[in-house]
Amino acid sequence: MPDQIHPAERLLNLVIALVNTSARMTKEQIRRSVAGYADAASDDAFERMFERDKDTLRELGIPILTVTGSGHGDDIGYRIDQEAYALPPIDLTAAELGVLSLAAQFWQDSSARVDTSRAITKLRAVGAAPEATDLVAGLAPRVSAGGDAFAPLLDAVQARQAVTFRYRAASSGEVLTRVVEPWKLLARRGGWFVVGRDRDREAPRSFRLSRIEGRVRTVGPPDAFGEPDAAALADVLASWSAGESRVATLAVRPERAEALRARAVDATDELDVTDPWLARVVADRDLVHVPFTSAWELAEEAVGYGDAVVVLAPPAVRETVLRLLRVATTLDEQGESHG
């Protein structure tokens, strides 16, 4: 049996078909001629698949028209409004092209890097000025890749299908199996997160994709749960910014960790550099003061920069960095012992 077509490829096939149809395409024609819909196991499965894809394309701004046949009111077809779908001539200013370049740098995942680089190269060909990217030099945010977990989670969010995966806790390094109803994928300060309902805990939770180990697998049928509860989702998002705002002091190598530098604030407290070790650390580095509410979050971000960033204060963040490094060292030793 041939492999099923990926949902993203099926959506693209549908767009191509509806753009190129001379008049309209009925559901029967779409199921018969558009690659990907033959995978539907039944008429009901096809109906759900097509309605979900149609809604997704409309949410993306693709104008799909419903066209009724002249002879019968129930003879319904679909096509894309060519006039509304066509893009006007591209005329980007240097600042606009710079912002797009910054957005492209946001995507560090190898699965998207090739496509974004190709797109930016084409846009630069019609951009207003070659120095456009200079406007955002050094401001690119560091967002770790979603890895192999990103694509299956994105599909599961769209299909409203539960997933299971093994997840390593940040505090202890313990790996547990989680079963989650995924609501949304969000990028937040250095990483990708999936937000959803943890079935075992019967409560909303958020999970950092970089801590997912192994494959993400679907559990049960599509359309297994509805839209996320707005209040529960708001509570999860609010918990990320909850807590007292404090300021950490970091020693940063020159021209490194620009995302941290962009959030820096002026500090009134002077750092005592009489300690010989501290004096050596700051001798060839810049002191950067960064506000934070979560010690774990800032520690994980700092660890991601390697030896370019040393946390000097407060002790809670520094100790968390050391704990993360010890866990990473333990994992490396475990990998070598099983190699």
Image (cartoon, rainbow, N blue to C red):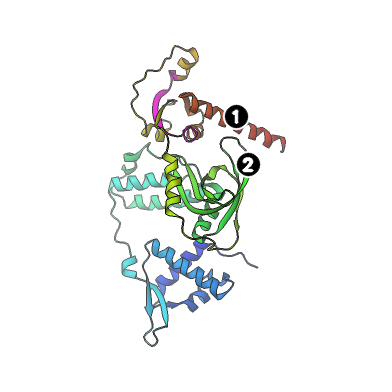
Residue for badge 2:
175
32 is within the stretch colored magenta: no
Q: Which residues are magenta?
A: 282-297
Quadrant occupied by the N terminus: bottom right
User: Is residue 290 in the magenta section?
Assistant: yes
Instruction: Between residue 162 and residue 334, name the one nearer to us.
Output: 162
Identify the residue at horizontal 52%, vertical 53% (top origin).
182
Q: Secondary structure at mark 1?
A: helix
Name the residue type under label 1: Arg
For marks 2 and 1 on the same chain, the one whose residue lies earlier in the sequence: 2
The quadrant of the picture occupied by the C terminus is: top right
At 36% from the left edge and 38% from the top edge, which residue is drawn? 137
Marks 2 and 1 close (CB-CB < 8 Å): no
Residue 326 — which label? 1
Q: Quadrant of residue 69?
A: bottom left
Position of residue 91 relative to residue 308, above or below, is below
Q: Is residue 74 above or below residue 326?
A: below
Residue at x 31% of width, y 43% of height: 132
Q: In this rendering, would 9 be left or right of 74?
A: right
Report x, y in % for residue 22. Answer: 39, 77
**Closest to the observer, 339 or 263:** 263
Task: Check the image and report above or below for 26 versus 269.
Answer: below
